[in-house]
Image (tube, grey):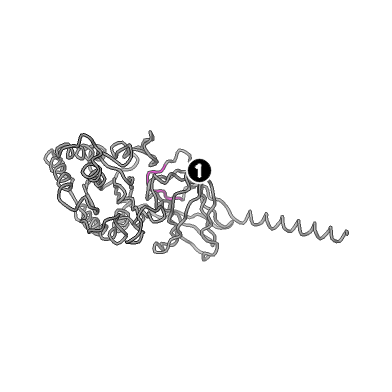
Amino acid sequence: MRNIAQCIKFVSVLFIASFSFLLSANQLISADHKNYLYSGRIDFSQPQAPLLSWPGSSIKANFTGSYLAVVLDDQKGKNFFNVIIDGDELSPYVLEAKQGQHTYVISSVLADKVHSLEIYKRTEGEEGSTYFKGLELADKSSLLAPPQRWSRRMEIYGDSITSGMGNEGADNGADHLQSEKNNYLAYGAIAARELKAELHTISQSGIGIMISWFDFIMPQFYDQLSAVGNNDSNWDFKLWTPDVVLVNLMQNDSWLVDREKRLQPIPNDAQRIAHYQDFVAGIRQLYPDAYIICALGSMDATKSEKWPNYIRAAVNNLKTSGDSKIDTLFFEFTGYGQHPRVAQHKANAKKLAAFVREKMHWD
């Protein structure tokens, strides 16, 4: 009996020691470490738990070692993230966040060398916000100096097209699934990477300038720090100034005003132009030196010239009043009846990047 008891005691001690070793084998690199490179409108009021809500918000880092885990605390359990290691954007680890705080093991078998990392929010504010709590690395691994931040800056105000709603869906399938909403492959994000420009994406599916599918519009939403619904958070526009601003709005207005007749009384042409012009003029006040591109498409608002002409008229009025750094750009309607898929986004990105290069003289 004594031998059995001694054996049990020995095994118990061995198990506890082994378990303790496993717990100590990894280290948490807190989110307030100086070697993280954050991008986007991110709430840093809790430095050890930055809050990401806008699509395209990202965290970049360089690290050593074979083990990587990400610690997130998600509000709703509806967000998706791309985790891109060593620049392999064609086959990212797609992280589906669960509600609450969880540790997500990305890999325990990486080559024991220096790696690059990007954590990229695919989804938008309607899926909720996410606290980033840091990375877990192997005990003797380290977080190295971050990659260099791009000096060029772009900002986009848009709707579901800009967010990337349904862009990874099948052509003959649904386009509302959270898992198939990938802002990384939306036209703005693709173009910004091609131009090597840091991008802030301020978009919300269903939003308009005059009316939305819900009870707030872009003029009430564009200045928020948090992308989760209409709230009283405030973004400090002095923190980050873009060189180029793209406004791609009015698709939802076209549906809700002309087709659904939800805005009563129905605004006349002059009122439609004025609403758009007022929003763009407000952007100009924030960014006196930015080049503003007033865009539309590539859904059916560009099927005819009606809604593009409202935008042209607003831009012409602003040019007449002395604004020389503003122009229009329209993405053609392809005849496809749902949200643009990745192929359309790539084509639109090519057009946008070429336009920006020409206007900004960016090589």
Label 1: few (<14), some or many (≥20) within 10 Å? some
Q: Residue at x 47, y 45 (%)?
A: 76
Instruction: Name the residue nearer the viewer: 159 or 114.
Output: 159
In the rendered structure, the answer to whether residue 44 lies left or right of residue 194 reads: right
| Position of residue 110 measured from the top left corner of the image (x, y, whole percent) | 52, 64
Question: Is label 1 in a helix, a strand or a loop?
Answer: loop
Task: Give the quarter of the image for residue 90.
Answer: bottom left
| Position of residue 3 measured from the top left corner of the image (x, y, whole percent) | 86, 61
Pick the quarter of the image with the C terminus.
bottom left
Residue matched to label 1 = 48
In the rendered structure, the answer to whether residue 270 lies left or right of residue 239 reads: left
Number of callouts: 1
Is residue 237 at all visible to an observer of this figure?
A: no
The three-letter code of the residue at mark 1 reads Gln
Furthest residue in direction right, as rendered: 1
Furthest residue in direction bottom, as rendered: 111
Is residue 177 at all visible to an observer of this figure?
A: yes
Q: Residue at x 35, y 40 (%)?
A: 239
| Position of residue 282 measured from the top left corner of the image (x, y, whole percent) | 24, 37
In the rendered structure, the answer to whether residue 206 lies left or right of residue 139 reads: left
Q: Please tell me whether residue 72 belongs to the stretch shown in magenta.
A: no
Q: Residue at x 46, y 45 (%)?
A: 130
Pick the quarter of the image with the N terminus.
bottom right
Furthest residue in direction front, as rendered: 260
Q: Residue at x 26, y 56 (%)?
A: 337
Q: Please tell me whether residue 38 belongs to the stretch shown in magenta.
A: yes
Q: Decide: is 67 above or below 125.
A: below
Q: Report the magenta residues as a range.
A: 36-42
Instruction: Name the residue nearer the viewer: 157 or 60.
Output: 157
